[in-house]
Amino acid sequence: MWSLLREDAARVIDEEPSLHHLIEDVVLSRDGLAAALGARLARRLAREDMPRARMEPLFEGVFRENPALAASAARDLLAIYDRDPACFSPLEPLLFFKGFLALATYRVAHQLWQDGRRWLALYLQSLVSEAFSVDIHPAARIGCGILLDHATSFVVGETAIVEDDVSILHEVTLGGTGKQSGDRHPIVRSGVLLGAGAKILGRVEIGTGAKVGAGSVVLADVPPHTTVAGVPAVVVGEARELNPAVEMDQRLQCRKSCPGE
């Protein structure tokens, strides 16, 4: 991954010299993905109360001390490159895609949360919400190989769990249903595709390889490899793909007629 990023970075400088400073700073002057992530996130999130000179070593240090985080970010880059037809290089998400950058920042905040540095984790959450319009609680558990497409208004509650290899469109909410404490947010199993504007509320489970139609409100468990849609969402058919998250086919495979048809 790092070799590919450096090759693409050199090519971009040749094609667009006006981006030389950005490319040199984030990629070509760095020794690996951990340093590149630290530089890019600090450039996007630095503020007067946390300037880049303090923020960049924080990000880079967390990624270097926890190599699995950088590996997860690499898996995210590959997921975006593989699944998003608008992405022509893994370098694009690293530089420009706010979904990837928001998720990479969450990974640092989650590690800080686990390390007991909760105030700093919450501070990073607030920065991501302000900069990217994405609100992920640092205690949530999110796997790798995640495509967070467009990302605007994506919200994840404190006790939510998202497994590996999930694709999520914009305006998705993984939320609760009230003021209860404890495990109160959804579980999303691997291979799931969540359509734009889907709202999954409460401690419900979206089964492996399921598909949730755009604009649906899910209030009950979704069986594996099924398609649900509607408000409230109901099963409308089976997901033909073994892994809807990878195929990214957002059409509904309905048994008879889909809601609204």
Image (cartoon, rainbow, N blue to C red):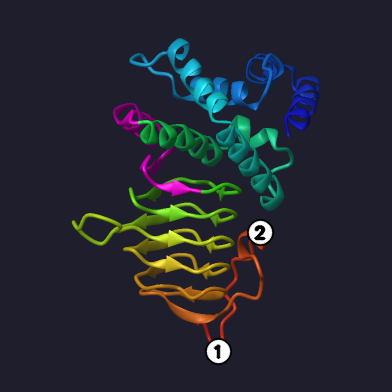
| Nearer-the-camera pick, 73 or 126 | 73
Is 127 placed left or right of 37 in the picture? left
Tell me the residue at 74%/41% (across/down). Answer: 88
Tell me the residue at 54%/21% (across/down). Answer: 60
Mark yes or no: residue 56 visible: yes
Mark yes or no: residue 260 visible: no
Magenta run includes residue 180: no
Is disc 2 surrounded by few (<14), some (14 to 19) or many (20+) residues within 10 Å? many
The reply to whether callout 1 and callout 2 are in contact (CB within 8 Å) is no
Image coordinates of residue 191 in percent, x first then y, are: 59, 62
> The disc labelled 1 sits on which kind of residue?
Lys
* Residue for badge 1: 256
- Quadrant location of the N terminus? top right
Q: How many numbered discs, if any?
A: 2
Q: CA distance from mark 1 to mark 2?
A: 25 Å
Is disc 1 surrounded by few (<14), some (14 to 19) or many (20+) residues within 10 Å? few
Callout 2 secondary element: helix
* Residue for badge 2: 246
Is 5 placed left or right of 166 in the picture? right
| Nearer-the-camera pick, 186 or 81 | 186
Image coordinates of residue 24 in percent, x first then y, are: 68, 15
Image coordinates of residue 14 in percent, x first then y, are: 81, 20
The answer to which image quadrant residue 255 occupies is bottom right
228, above or below 62, in the image: below
The answer to which image quadrant residue 38 occupies is top right
Is 178 placed left or right of 205 in the picture? left
> The disc labelled 2 sits on which kind of residue?
Val
140, above or below 57, in the image: below
Image coordinates of residue 261 in percent, x first then y, are: 50, 82
What segment is highlighted magenta in the picture?
A: 116-142
